[in-house]
Each structure stands twice: as structure tokens, then as C-alpha cells.
């Protein structure tokens, strides 16, 4: 991925704008299920997310997520997300001109 300075040298002045993800996003990319963590336990859904293909074996993390969901630890830590209608997950629009 080019740096912002490289993009600006090629395109001229650029503007970087946050692209918050709505709570009901159904697109299926990595951050789409930020409010529905059980989706990450679904093999079909993970298979469609390219970052999971690059990570390799994620079974340890999935076991931890499943355990946290069952015990309520996930809700205690992240339950406040249920009150949000969108979340800044770090995605950005980069526009030139």
C-alpha cells in the first residue's frame, strides 16, 4: 500500500475522510460484523474475508472469542458497542482533486 505522501505525489492534494461502518452493514468484509461477533465464528463468513486467508491458523483466537461470548466476558468488555449505530474501524476514503 502506498503511503499518503506517495499518493499525493501522484495525484496532487488529497483528502482523507473516515468511513465509519454502520451497525447493520451486510457487505461481509472484515469489519462488517463489528456488532455481531458470533459471525466471526462462522467458517463460511470467514472464508469470504481475505484477511483471514492471510492470517493462517486463527483457531486459538476463535476459541478465545467463543469462550468470551459464552462466559459474557465479550459483552462486559464490548457490550457498549450495541448502543452505536456506526463505528470507526480505521477505514478511510482517500480522494484527490
Image: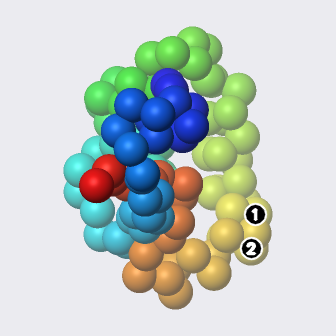
**Nearest the camera: 26 or 79?**
26
- In the image, residue 67 sits, relative to residue 74, either above or below, namely above
- Residue 23: in sight, yes or no? yes
Looking at the image, which residue is at 29% across and 45% down?
Answer: 28
In the picture, the quarter occupied by the C terminus is bottom left
> Where is residue 10 drawn, in percent x and y?
39, 31
Residue that carries the numbered disc 2 in the rendered image = 76
Residue 52 x %, y %? 48, 25
In front here: 62 or 8? 8
Front-lying residue, 89 or 25: 89
Which image quarter: residue 72? bottom right
- Marks 2 and 1 sit apart, C-alpha to C-alpha, by 5 Å
* Count of labels in the image: 2
Quarter of the view holding residue 5: top right
Quarter of the image for residue 81 reads bottom right
* Residue situated furthest left in the rendering: 27
Q: Is residue 83 above or below residue 93?
A: below
Q: Is residue 71 left or right of residue 44?
A: right
Where is residue 24? Give x, y as percent.
30, 69
Residue at 46% x, 64% y is 18
Residue 87 circle label: none
In the drawing, does residue 46 fall left or right of residue 83? left
Q: Secondary structure at mark 2?
A: helix
How dense is the environment of label 2, judged by Cα within 10 Å: few (below 14), some, or many (20 and up)?
A: few
Residue found 43% across the figure and 75% down from its top: 86
Q: Visible in this render: residue 34?
A: no
Query: Compared with residue 54, is residue 73 higher up or lower down, i.e. above or below?
Result: below
For this view, does 73 lie left or right of residue 34?
right
Q: Which mark is residue 73?
A: 1
Q: Mark 2 and mark 1 in contact? Answer it, CB < 8 Å.
A: yes
> For numbered disc 1, what is the local secondary structure?
helix
Amino acid at each position: 500500500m502506498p503511503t499518503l505522501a506517495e499518493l499525493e505525489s501522484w495525484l496532487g492534494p488529497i483528502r482523507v475522510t473516515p468511513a465509519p461502518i454502520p451497525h447493520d452493514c451486510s457487505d461481509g468484509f472484515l469489519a462488517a460484523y463489528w456488532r455481531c461477533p458470533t459471525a466471526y465464528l462462522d467458517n463460511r463468513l470467514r472464508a469470504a474475508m481475505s484477511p483471514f486467508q492471510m492470517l493462517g491458523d486463527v483457531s486459538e483466537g476463535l476459541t478465545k472469542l467463543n469462550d468470551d461470548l459464552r462466559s459474557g466476558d465479550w459483552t462486559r468488555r464490548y457490550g457498549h458497542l450495541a448502543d452505536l449505530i456506526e463505528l470507526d474501524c480505521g477505514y478511510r476514503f482517500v480522494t484527490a482533486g
